[in-house]
Image (cartoon, rainbow, N blue to C red):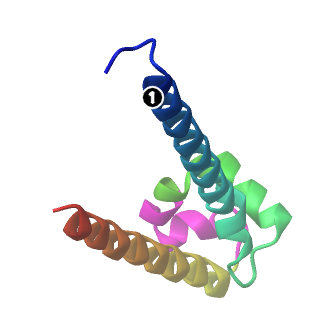
Amino acid sequence: MDPKSQGFYYDQRIQDEVHRFAVTFHRKVHAKNSLGSRLDSIAGVGPKTRNKLLRKFGSLKKISDASVDDIRALGISETVARTIKFSLSKIDEERRVTNYQDKKLIN
């Protein structure tokens, strides 16, 4: 197709619009899955606890990899520390299942 033709121009505009929608969707997903929202959804974790955890560990992955004792060292009760570990492991499992299903759909 000639790059200067109306058909090419029309196809390019459709492609640009599809890309815009895809980027918007992924931004919404990223915002929804941000660090704060996942920690805030855990019972017993408020803004102060979330800030302590993120300052010490830096990421959800590192918090998930930390031991209950490491979390307790921040002044968090054992019950809440265990809840955090359980909740993050549950989130990791959901992510693995979703990734597996996505790969299965692609293949």
Residue at 67 percent across and 62 percent down: it is 32
Q: Is residue 77 above or below residue 37?
A: below
Is residue 73 on the magenta stretch? yes
Is residue 61 on the magenta stretch? no
| Front residue of 21 and 43 | 21
| Front residue of 17 and 5 | 5
Q: Residue 94: image x %, image y %?
A: 41, 77
The kind of residue on which mark 1 rests is: Gly
Residue at 67 percent across and 52 percent down: it is 54
Q: Residue 92: image x %, image y %?
A: 42, 70
Judged from the image, the secondary structure of the residue bearing numbered disc 1 is helix
Residue at 54 percent across and 58 percent down: it is 60
Instruction: Inspect this view and state whether residue 53 appears.
Output: no
How many labels sit on residues?
1
Quadrant holding the N terminus: top left
**Residue at which label 1 appears:** 7
Q: Is residue 11 above or below residue 38?
A: above
Quadrant holding the C terminus: bottom left
54 left or right of 26 in image: right
59 left or right of 53 in image: left
Q: Is residue 8 above or below residue 92?
A: above
Q: Which residues are magenta?
A: 63-76
Q: Is residue 12 above or below residue 39?
A: above
